[in-house]
Image: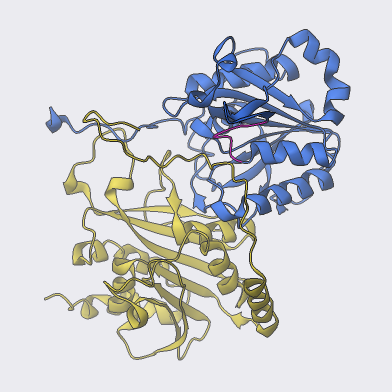
Chain colours: A blue, B yellow
Amino acid sequence: MFISSQDSPATFQGFTLVMPAVAVGNVGQLAVDLIVSTLNMRRVGYFHTDCLIPMAGNNPYASGKADAEELHTPAEVYTAAELKLAVLQIRAPIIQTRSKKFRQQLKSWIKASGFSRTVVLSSSHAYQRDDQQLQGTSLRYLMTPSLLAASADALKELGWREMERIPAFPGVDAEPRLCIPGGGITKGLYTDGCAEDLPLAVLLLFCSEGDNIPDAFALVNHLNDWLHLLDGQWKIPTSWSLLFGSGIPPALF
Amino acid sequence: MATFFGEVLSVYSRAVEEDEEELEENEEDEQIRRELEEKRAGNKVQCSSFILAVGHNAASFLSVYILASANWDAVGRGVAWNERSRSGTGPSGEGSACVFYRHKDEPAVLICHVTCHIAEDQLFQWTEKVFGYLQTRGLTVTVLSDSSVADYKTADYLCSSSAPFLRSLRSSAFSDQPVCQSLEQPNIITGLPAAVLNHCQVHSIAAVVYQCYSDVTGPDSITMDKYKPVLTKLGSTDVLRNFVRSSEIQSNLYI
């Protein structure tokens, strides 16, 4: 559930919510890090839930010593009121048997907060693309019918590619279905959004585990083409250091 | 993933797989949980200082330096059932529960030893349950936690002579100065210390975690000694302040 970290509770009425899905390469989460870091977004509360693996650390967006020692939790909400933008950052994996519960908690919160639209940043395993998906851009989108109605013109102008329905088992089961392998709760959120008439969009890209920083930049720029959040450069947060481990012992060589 | 030697390893990916079939919590579990919640009485335990030791060195440190005097009562025990608690090897049953101690003269001071494994999906509930019993106004929580130096990330290679060392993380409500350096980015803490710290952060309870990074995995007196500076900060009540003075005399476990 959402717990405000401020004296007066934040209001999200009419805001756009951007949130990541914990998915392959953690691309959505990295992209959200870039948004929070660059737009200097302010933390307004915690999404306190038993569905995420607990973790804690100091401020990942610290700009200096003054704000370095501020504790951060696995799921937090940030806002940039001037852009009517709210961001939910998720920093820990979802406990496997609680994925449905987590989706339900998210949906309840989204409905109760009055967000005008929700954008889920996600990713999918590149190695599971079928032949048609291998061609062209690796970026895809999905939109629930209620958001599609409002954004049809923007989509046409952007020329985005909708996520294809593909047979789950080519040659065996020919019926095209929506499959987002490696996407975590993305598909569940999207199908729930369609069923419950939530204005929800998914932006995802095909990638593999590895150095996913370029993927994060690609995804956030793609989002920016639509939402126009930023004119300049994205700022990498201070927490993006030592992503592949500590320094190497000199004696190794 | 395939390695250079041609073997195929299954690699844990942080991406949660799409699951077509969700495991619903079964009715029996739900009913048990409901009954337990109903049983829980409304009276909360008055507590001004709650000290939690997670790991064998942290627990041994508290045993040697604080619990060694006979003035503590074991007032409670918690057992977490999970895949590791059923294993035949290693400490089990008696030796690996969470034990709560309360001082006879100062009942507002509580100590808890956690040497058993608490599974990832039990951490949140454990924390909620324990803090549900405590009166949290004016409460300060101190967590001592063992960790491996292999989990500590630093740009300059850490040679083994620098371990063990202490790092701290505190909630926003903790206004005092910790006894050691704050945990630098990009390091994080996980497990029970993180669950406790999250709870305290979200509910504005003053809390500090002292994580000791050691290159020794088992009980070790040098690692235990690293927690000593914490004693100076536990002096919020007279009971604990006495231990700061007398700790030198008490440290004769390893002659």
Membership of A58 in magenta stretch = no
Residue B253 appears in view: yes
Q: Quadrant of the N terminus of chain A?
A: bottom right
Q: Is residue A93 above or below residue A139?
A: below
Q: Is residue B20 above or below residue A83?
A: below
Membership of A182 in magenta stretch = yes
**Image quadrant assignment for residue B43:** bottom right
Q: Position of residue A50 (x, y in %)?
A: 60, 58
Residue closer to the observer: B170 or B33 = B33
Would residue B238 appear left or right of A223 to someone viewing this image? Answer: left
Would residue A6 appear left or right of A76 to someone viewing this image? Answer: right
Predominant SS along the magenta part: loop
Q: Position of residue B117 (x, y in %)?
A: 40, 66
Q: Quadrant of the C terminus of chain A?
A: top left
Residue closer to the observer: B176 or A180 = A180
**Image quadrant assignment for residue B73:** bottom left
Would residue A161 appear left or right of B173 to someone viewing this image? Answer: right
Would residue B109 appear left or right of B220 to someone viewing this image? Answer: right
Q: Residue at x 54, y 45 (%)?
A: A70
Q: Is residue B31 above or below residue A80?
A: below
Q: Which residues are magenta?
A: A178-184
Q: Position of residue B94 (x, y in %)?
A: 35, 83
